[in-house]
Image (cartoon, rainbow, N blue to C red):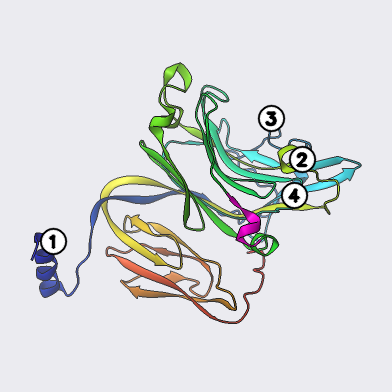
Amino acid sequence: MNRLAELCAITVALHGSCVSAAVGGWQFAWSDEFDRTGTPIVSNVWKWDGGGSMVRDARLDRSNGYCTNGVLVLEAKRVGTNQYTSAAISTIGLKSWLYGRFEMRGRIDIRSGSWPAWWTTGVSGGWPAGGEIDMMEYYTDKLLLNVMNGKKEWANPHLSAKALGGPGWASQFHTWIMEWDSTKIDLSLDGQLVNHYLLTNADGTGPNGANPFKAPQYMRVNLAIGQLGGDPSATEFPMKFEVDYIRTWQWVDSTAYLCTVESGTGAGPYLPGTMVSLTANMAPAGKSFEKWVVSSGAALIAAANNPVATFTMPSSDVKITATYKPGVAPVPPTP
């Protein structure tokens, strides 16, 4: 019996359970749940941003960005022949991040002309020297999870929206996640790792020969129209990019416990007392989501019958499983 097994055996004998506590885990840091009504602008976080690539062939109209029913909506409208309005927000000059875990749950329009994105740009150095991380970008069937270093060199693997299910896939909310530290950037969609980027690829490419991804980044959320998004002239408007929430965690070198998630996202080491997000995978054909089940550990899940749920991490490992029942999954209502 190895030393770990011996310790577990002793722990089980004395306390009835064995946990795999580790040094280092995610601690909840900040979120925007968009649970207000009207303008999405928060004075110390968000501002309107219509410059550069934010709306492209459209023009910024602040009335096209709003919060309703717990969702941020960026809406594009046709206002004349080949004329469009849209909306975009960013944290430029207000709030920035250096490393962490970032999660966005959203629903995007994949019709011709649509070009939504959730991304970051560097606080210093301008573009491209400050780097760019596209946690979510879509245009012309491409679901991109990109990283661009300060010399405009791209690592841009992508998935096909059509292959994932096309309009049916786009009718659902999905979860995009970035985990970023001093060595790597991992970009995932619905629990599938798409881009594993080593920060050494950006060494020397940033301002004054620095690495742009070892410096703070601003966050941006926008719905652009046209150009790379394709021709919108035959598309029925409005288009919408809807965001249920954006959440962030920071890595802390303290005792953490492991959350294991089956058939969903949210796995990882978390500090006790930290909010954990759960998002169930899309239901298999012929089935619909039923509920979250705590397979082991002592987690109390809020709204366990909702495919998107949260719980507070206990001082022990937990395993949580998304279960499904017979029946076609309905298109989820706006949260």
Mark positioned earlier in the residue sequence (2 or 3): 3
Q: Which residues are magenta?
A: 159-165
Q: Name the residue type under label 2.
A: Gly
Q: Crowding near pointer 3: few (<14 within 10 Å), some, many (20+)? A: few
Mark positioned earlier in the residue sequence (4 or 1): 1
Residue highlighted by disc 2: 226
Mark positioned earlier in the residue sequence (2 or 4): 4
Question: Which residue does the image show at 39% across and 70% down from the upper left?
Answer: 320
Element at label 3: loop
Location of the C terminus (image quadrant)? bottom right
Q: Crowding near pointer 4: few (<14 within 10 Å), some, many (20+)? A: many
Q: Position of residue 79 (x, y in %)?
A: 88, 44
Q: Name the residue type under label 1.
A: Leu
Residue highlighted by disc 4: 75
Residue highlighted by disc 1: 4
* CA distance separating discs 2 and 3: 13 Å
Mark positioned earlier in the residue sequence (1 or 3): 1
* CA distance separating discs 1 and 3: 55 Å
Which mark is in front, 1 or 3? 1
* CA distance separating discs 2 and 4: 14 Å
Question: Which residue does the image show at 37% across and 56% down from the upper left?
Answer: 274
Mark positioned earlier in the residue sequence (2 or 1): 1
Which mark is in front, 4 or 3? 3
In the picture, the disc for residue 265 is none
Q: Position of residue 143 (x, y in %)?
A: 60, 49
Location of the N terminus (image quadrant)? bottom left
Residue 289 relative to residue 1: left or right: right
248 relative to 307, above or below: above
Q: Crowding near pointer 2: few (<14 within 10 Å), some, many (20+)? A: many
* CA distance separating discs 4 and 3: 18 Å
In the picture, the disc for residue 52 is 3
Toward the front, the furthest residue is 163
